């Protein structure tokens, strides 16, 4: 698929997508429920077998090999319409996480050779902030919206572009090739008060990174330990803040002043 071509890099092998009409890899024990696919109300069930991770969404079965290097799909007629969402959603996100590339729920902007990442719950304002900043300043470019793929590169956390952004049109996709160092992370929190920004350190900062990492409920204990190690490393090299963000034009200007400080 063209959307997987950005991952043709020596240090991050692309998952190979295959089909298996027999579906022998589906033999497993208990299935557990773990979240949804995108904005659809479709539940993801998952399980673990000897060769990897199993995902099941209505009409689609997906197997991710334990090293993250192969994704196997099987879809019934009822699942064909959501096949891409499953592959580029939980399938790809899980495969990348098994290779040490984690996906954050957020939006990001790039300024020269660095990036700023905005994370938060749905409705916190991540997309609004990134879109407004890129629209009002030619020096700022929106590089991700909704899902941001990140990995440790040369000791620092970097944005890995271009991750397929399902919420952006084709001409809005960021097509850069080099990893971009993430200078700051802002955790947006919707408020009716005034906009204000506070630094986070230690456990609070690590928990913020962990809380906004996508699909961690799909991981087993060893993978979760690697994720916690990643969260700890992020706090040592990246400035992390919590930002109260009232949804208003004035607060957008205050966000701009904050990232300029």
Image (cartoon, grey):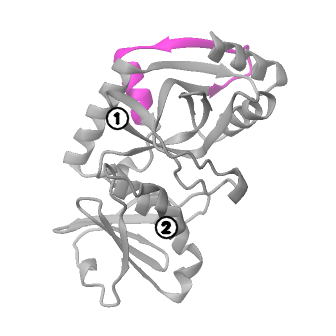
- Residue 204 vertical placement versus 208 (above, below): above
Query: In what element is the residue under mark 2?
Result: helix
Q: CA distance from mark 2 to mark 1?
A: 26 Å
Q: Is residue 46 left or right of residue 244?
A: left
User: What is the span of residues highlighted in magenta in the rendered image?
Assistant: 189-210
Question: In this orientation, does residue 173 appear?
Answer: yes
Q: Position of residue 11 (x, y in %)?
A: 31, 48
Task: Specify the label residue 86 is tagged with.
Answer: 2
Regarding residue 125, the answer to whether it shows in the image is: no
Give x and y (percent) for residue 241.
52, 18
| Residue shown at the point (24%, 40%) measured from the top left | 226
Q: Please state if 66 lies on the left or on the right of 9 as rendered.
A: left
| Image coords of residue 79 (percent x, y) | 53, 80
158 vs 178, nearest the viewer: 178
Please say if 3 is above or below 18. above
In this figure, which residue is indicated by the disc labeled 1?
A: 152
Residue 190 in the magenta stretch? The answer is: yes
- Residue for point 34% across, 30% down: 231
Q: Nearer the viewer, residue 233 or 139?
A: 139
Residue 197 against residue 164 in the figure, above or below? above
């Amino acid at each position: 698929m063209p959307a997987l071509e950005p991952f043709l890099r020596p240090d991050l092998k692309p998952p190979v997508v295959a089909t298996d009409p027999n579906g022998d890899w589906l033999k497993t024990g208990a299935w557990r429920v773990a979240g949804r696919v995108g904005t659809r109300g479709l539940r993801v069930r998952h399980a673990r077998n000897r060769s990897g991770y199993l995902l099941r969404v209505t009409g689609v079965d997906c197997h991710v090999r334990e090293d993250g290097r192969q994704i196997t799909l099987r879809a019934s007629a009822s699942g064909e319409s959501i096949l891409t969402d499953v592959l580029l959603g939980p399938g790809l996100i899980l495969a990348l996480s098994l290779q040490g590339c984690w996906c954050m729920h957020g939006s990001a902007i790039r300024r020269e050779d660095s990036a700023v990442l905005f994370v938060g719950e749905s409705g916190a304002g991540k997309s609004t902030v990134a879109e407004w900043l890129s629209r009002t300043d030619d020096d700022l470019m929106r590089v991700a919206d909704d899902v941001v793929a990140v990995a440790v590169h040369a000791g620092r956390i970097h944005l890995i572009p271009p991750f397929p952004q399902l919420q952006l049109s084709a001409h809005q996709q960021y097509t850069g090739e080099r990893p971009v160092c993430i200078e700051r992370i802002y955790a947006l929190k919707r408020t009716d008060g005034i906009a204000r920004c506070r630094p986070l350190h230690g456990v609070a900062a690590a928990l913020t990174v962990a809380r906004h990492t996508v699909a961690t409920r799909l991981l087993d204990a060893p993978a979760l330990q690697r994720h916690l190690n990643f969260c700890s490393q992020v706090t040592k090299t990246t400035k992390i803040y919590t930002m109260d963000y009232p949804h208003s034009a004035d607060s957008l200007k205050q966000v701009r002043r904050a990232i300029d400080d």
